[in-house]
Image (cartoon, rainbow, N blue to C red):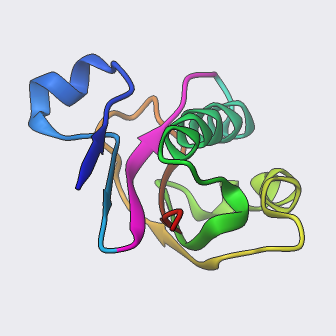
Amino acid sequence: MKRIFSGSPFEEKIGYARAVVAGGLVHVAGTVGQGDTVTEQCRAALATIEKALAEAGAGFGDAVRVTYYLPDATEFEPCWPILRETFGANPPAATMVECNLIDPKYRIEIELTARAPV
């Protein structure tokens, strides 16, 4: 098993890893991004996830499942082009959940599972 940390102060404060490689999968923790708009936050969260996947030897083409958490479901549609661009011809199974996030400034949180390299 391999644990991957991004250096976020919350990993230390809360006690979690950005990603864990185990059982043939890369499990990436729910990830938020900085920015004022949902699309800025979506891109920033995906960049953090991409770095964790790369450290695990994987990429977005290896994604098998993704869950999007948004406090306002109407803000999901502006993210669709970003997600299509990110996953391209290899889209994962996906779910979108409307819920509160840890801080009202966050507009989207993304959790992803990918195949680990063999």
Foreground of the two, 58 or 89: 58
Foreground of the two, 24 or 109: 24
Q: Please report the residue visible at 63 percent of the width from the left and 42 percent of the height from the top.
A: 46
Q: Please report the residue visible at 67 percent of the width from the left and 61 percent of the height from the top.
A: 74
Residue 21 rendering spot, x and y as whole percentages: 34, 57
Q: Please report the residue visible at 88 percent of the width from the left and 65 percent of the height from the top.
A: 88
Hey, which quadrant is residue 84 in on the image? bottom right
Residue 117 rendering spot, x and y as whole percentages: 53, 62
Residue 95 rendering spot, x and y as whole percentages: 54, 77
Q: Residue furthest front?
A: 118
Hey, which quadrant is residue 18 in on the image? top left
User: Which range of residues does the magenta coloring cover?
Assistant: 24-35
User: How many numbered discs sit on the rendered protein?
Assistant: 0
Q: Is residue 77 left or right of residue 115?
A: right
Q: Is residue 97 left or right of residue 73?
A: left
Quadrant where the N terminus sits is bottom left
Answer whether residue 115 is visible to the viewer in this image. Answer: yes
Per the picture, the main secondary structure of the magenta-coloured stretch is: strand
Answer whether residue 76 is visible to the viewer in this image. Answer: no
Residue 43 rendering spot, x and y as whole percentages: 70, 37
Judge whether residue 52 is colored magenta.
no
Foreground of the two, 99 or 42: 42
Q: Is residue 7 left or right of residue 54?
A: left
Q: Is residue 19 left or right of residue 76?
A: left
